[in-house]
Image: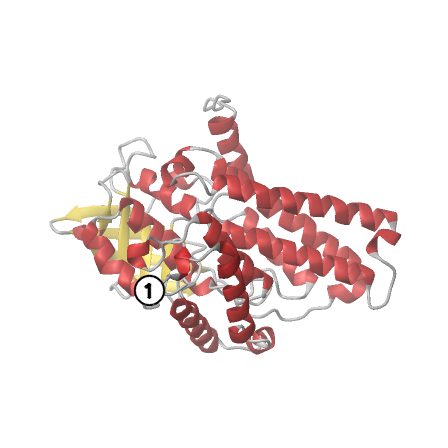
Amino acid sequence: MPGIRAHQLPPDELRAGVRQWCAEHVPHDWHERQTSASHEEFVRFQNWWFGELRAAGYAVPHWPQSWGGGFDLARQAVIFEELARADAPRLSLHFVSLHHAAGTFLDAGTPEQRSRYLPGILDGAVWCQGFSEPEAGSDLASLRTRAERHGDVYVVNGQKIWASGAAYAQHCLLLVRTDPGAPKRRGISYLVMDMDSPGVLVRPIRQITGEEHFCEIFLTDVEIPVGNLIGAENDGWRVAQSTLASERGGTMIELAERLAVGLRRLLLEAAGPGGPPPTADTVVGDRLARLAREVQALRLLVRQVITRSSSELAQGAHASVVKLYYSELLQRLTAFGMELAGLDGQRAVRRPVGSGWESGAWLLDHIGSWEWTIPGGTSEIQRNIIAERALGLPREPAA
């Protein structure tokens, strides 16, 4: 089809092209190479892989056409599915940049802010998210980091925690309290902070798996220009809902498909080389069948949810339903993988840097799965959101 662009290709033709591209470009040994990678090597690898995807036109299919995307949902699904099925590396270093930051600017940013920041994201700029605090994780609206306006700048003091990738980031999406006297959800503002600003200190948090992608951020008299305010002052809570909704859009297609890949891995390991089919053991067969049904239900659920607009996602419980269902299904699947692996599966091994939960070692994958029930709102918080926004149940009165 002469002159046709990738986002206009018929889905079947696009799928064949993405599959062929993956066969030629996904490094077959990336797991092994990243298992022993230093932090510097991890950053170089992630930047290289982002460049490969961008050159192919597959890095930002969920963005508008004017910014290099323009794929409809059906074609986005094709790209994310094929990347997952090819076991392509995840862009974990650029996740906040490509989804949270971009989604926020496209939904709530000014034209000047989009022109200032989106080209940098396409060039590989790394962003982090400064939302959670030591006393305001699940109850995000209780955040205490203060921003006081002095002329053309906000002066910020406080602490953030669990900021993924902050040690590598150039910019931060920052929630601050600008009106301490207002009801807690109404006194919050949303700022963009340059990570090299004086007064910013980043401290990585070492995890049980040996990784350090979560960080603390300490802020001491940090000056942020007023022009870095996204949305109106004291309206940051509303903007933040768009940010959180953006992570559960098209990217959930890929996560659901990677879960399906994990299920296929379970099936192969349950059978063993030359062994009987998994269904030969009725207990194992029943559990695998149940997981298969749940994975397929997740796929269907994701496709329903991503058809919602960003405002619907921000106001409703759809994103919370997906997040809750995916994270707890991931725990069940990886836990069963540990059971099938037996004692051999309990060996302490290193997982590839940035591999998420798909390391190839069920023990580490199961440990990694617990991250998903905490960031972006714990499972308990998601159930509260679903109860209030979907079921219409009343909020429990304060004591």
Residue nearest the observer in this picture, 332 or 193: 332
Residue 143 visible in the shown view: no
State the colouring used for the structure image: secondary structure
Q: Residue at x 33, y 60 (%)?
A: 68
Q: Residue at x 21, y 52 (%)?
A: 155
Q: Is residue 285 above or below residue 207?
A: above
Question: Residue 61: where, in percent of width, then height?
Answer: 41, 57
Relative to 187, is 389 on the left or the right?
Answer: right
- The residue sitting at the front extreme is 1
Examine the image and state in which quarter residue 170 appears.
Answer: bottom left
Question: Residue 285: where, in percent of width, then height?
Answer: 82, 49
Question: Residue 257: where, in percent of width, then height?
Answer: 59, 54
The amino acid pointed to by label 1 is Leu
Question: Residue 6: where, in percent of width, then height?
Answer: 41, 61
Relative to 146, is 342 on the left or the right?
Answer: right
Relative to 202, is 287 on the left or the right?
Answer: right
Residue nearest the observer in this picture, 399 or 170: 170
Placement of the N terminus among the 4 image quadrants: bottom left
Numbered disc 1: secondary structure: helix
Q: Is residue 145 above or below residue 165?
A: above
Examine the image and state in which quarter residue 316 appears.
Answer: top left
Q: Residue at x 24, y 43 (%)?
A: 231
Residue 192 visible in the shown view: yes
Circle 1 Cα neighbour tier, 10 Å, few/some/many (<14 / 14–19 / ≥20): many
Residue nearest the observer in this picture, 12 or 293: 12
Per the image, the residue denoted by label 1 is 122
Q: Is residue 263 above or below residue 126?
A: above
Q: How many marks?
A: 1
Q: Is residue 324 above or below residue 42?
A: above
